[in-house]
């Protein structure tokens, strides 16, 4: 106990026992980008913002899919010898587009709250059966408290109830007393793709296994050229990929040795873990040479311009995910209008398109901020509102609908 409290001094001193387990946190956006870049190096074509609207099926064979560009409105047909349905909580709906019934995926909705401090140095979890608010995870300069688990019929249900926020903060107090005194930056929700047999329809979502399921629809439903992979967790995603691609190769008649377990993702070849002071150290090395656009996340102008130039059609939310622009304590209050001007100035978007991107960004940030509007966060949100409404008058920008 003494060692645990020495390493994590903010832990509740009334805990009875502590165990060290191999656990860690990741940067989710860097992981997603690394996966997409790794696939592109091997010939993949990535189509973000495209929704599956139809599965092409000829008799008992799936031959591909039709996708809709949510931004441009165009539809595109993608033909394939084997089509993989890896759509998470939407897997059941996509399977129905192929005329396949009974792929029962129950969305388990949960919320998380980002606190504006690293309250702990390592992932801290309560040693109990899965429950709400049973862990605090340090991610870069913040800590995330999570999570609730509510059954929902809609994978697009991102409701955040005030009672859920209060429960999360109360449970954070049990792990780290004084947690509520820290500033809550934002709350958000996601859905888990929980796969179960139809006969277990009344099972509580906490009791449904997090194991993944690979469905071979040729054996299961008599439909060739179509696989569904669903369920699982982040800790098993590369195993899920291995099993899925092995099955694809088998259906294509091409046996290949899987290398996923030994192939590092782009950007992680060195095997060195991210260190908290990396961005500050890099900035201090050229302190007087480059303008900082986002002081919270130390995003320099050079990195911002390079990312804008490298990606056609990029918007402010894309920049947030790639650079963490606007993810700090002010939630974009000081940096995002600067980035909007730079994005337009580089010639990538028109003034009206830049205005629309700014309004969309502010609306998305507001969705996560309003559930935690109290104390310092309320004051920050009011100050941001003065900037964007009182000074910039964003409500009346001539942006396209």
Image: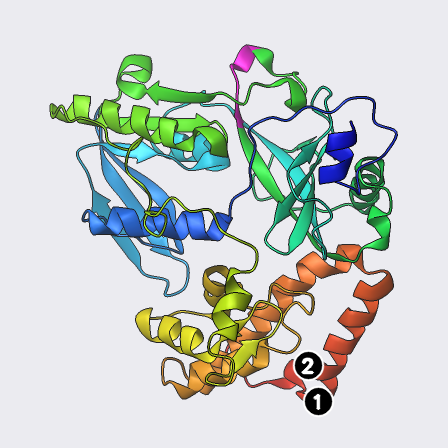
Q: Position of residue 162 (x, y in %)?
A: 81, 47
Q: Which residue is mark 1?
A: 391
Assign a secondary structure to mark 2: helix
- The answer to whether residue 23 is above or below residue 78 is above
Q: Position of residue 374 (x, y in %)?
A: 85, 60
Q: Are marks 1 and 2 in contact (CB under 8 Å)?
A: yes
40 relative to 299 in the view: left or right: left
Q: Position of residue 177 (x, y in %)?
A: 86, 42
Q: Nearer the viewer, residue 187 or 301?
A: 301
Q: Which residue is mark 2?
A: 388
- The answer to whether residue 227 is above or below residue 87 is above
Q: Quadrant of residue 350?
A: bottom left
Q: Position of residue 45 (x, y in %)?
A: 24, 52
**Which residue does the image show at 24% across and 51% down from the upper left?**
40
76 relative to 94 in the view: left or right: left
Q: Nearer the viewer, residue 328 or 22?
A: 22
Dot 2: within a 10 Å radius of its alpha carbon, few (fewer than 14), some, or many (20 or more) residues?
some
- The answer to whether residue 401 is above or below residue 213 is below
- Residue at the farthest left position: 253
Dot 1: within a 10 Å radius of its alpha carbon, few (fewer than 14), some, or many (20 or more) residues?
few
Q: Nearer the viewer, residue 401 or 9?
A: 9
69 relative to 336 in the view: left or right: left
**Which residue does the image show at 59% across and 85% down from the upper left?**
397
182 relative to 353 in the view: left or right: right
Q: Where are the magenta residues, as a range? A: 194-199
């Amino acid at each position: 106990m003494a060692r645990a409290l020495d390493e994590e001094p903010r832990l509740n001193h009334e805990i009875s026992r502590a165990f060290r387990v191999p656990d860690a946190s990741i940067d989710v956006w860097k992981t997603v980008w690394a996966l997409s870049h790794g696939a592109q190096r091997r010939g993949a074509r990535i189509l973000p913002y495209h929704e599956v609207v139809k599965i092409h099926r000829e008799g008992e064979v799936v031959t591909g899919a039709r996708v809709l560009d949510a931004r441009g409105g165009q539809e595109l047909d993608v033909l394939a010898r084997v089509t993989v349905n890896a759509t998470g909580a939407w897997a059941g709906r996509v399977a129905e587009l192929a005329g396949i019934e009974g792929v029962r995926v129950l969305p388990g909705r949960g919320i998380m709250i980002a606190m504006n401090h690293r309250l702990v140095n390592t992932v801290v979890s309560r040693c109990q059966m899965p429950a709400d608010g049973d862990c605090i995870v340090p991610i870069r300069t913040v800590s995330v408290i999570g999570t609730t688990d509510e059954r929902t019929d809609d994978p697009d249900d991102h409701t955040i109830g005030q009672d859920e926020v209060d429960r999360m903060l109360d449970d954070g107090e049990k792990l780290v007393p004084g947690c509520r005194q820290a500033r809550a930056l934002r709350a958000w929700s996601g859905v888990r793709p929980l796969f179960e047999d139809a006969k277990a329809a009344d099972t509580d979502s906490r009791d449904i296994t997090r194991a993944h399921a690979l469905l071979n629809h040729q054996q299961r439903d008599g439909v060739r050229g179509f696989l569904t992979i669903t369920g699982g967790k982040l800790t098993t995603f590369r195993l899920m990929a291995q099993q899925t691609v092995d099955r694809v190769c088998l259906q294509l008649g091409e046996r290949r040795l899987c290398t996923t377990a030994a192939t590092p993702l782009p950007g992680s070849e060195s095997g060195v873990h991210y260190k908290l002071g990396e961005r500050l150290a890099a900035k201090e090395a050229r302190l007087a040479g480059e303008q900082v656009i986002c002081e919270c996340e130390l995003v320099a102008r050079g990195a911002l311009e390079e990312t804008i130039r490298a990606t056609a059609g990029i918007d402010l939310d894309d920049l947030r995910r790639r650079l963490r622009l606007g993810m700090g304590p002010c939630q974009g209050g000081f940096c995002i209008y600067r980035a909007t001007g730079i994005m337009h100035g580089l010639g990538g978007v028109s003034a009206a398109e830049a205005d629309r991107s700014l309004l969309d960004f502010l609306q998305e940030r507001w969705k996560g901020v309003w559930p935690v509007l109290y104390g310092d966060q309320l004051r920050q949100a009011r100050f941001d509102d003065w900037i964007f409404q009182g000074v910039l008058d964003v409500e009346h920008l001539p942006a396209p609908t």
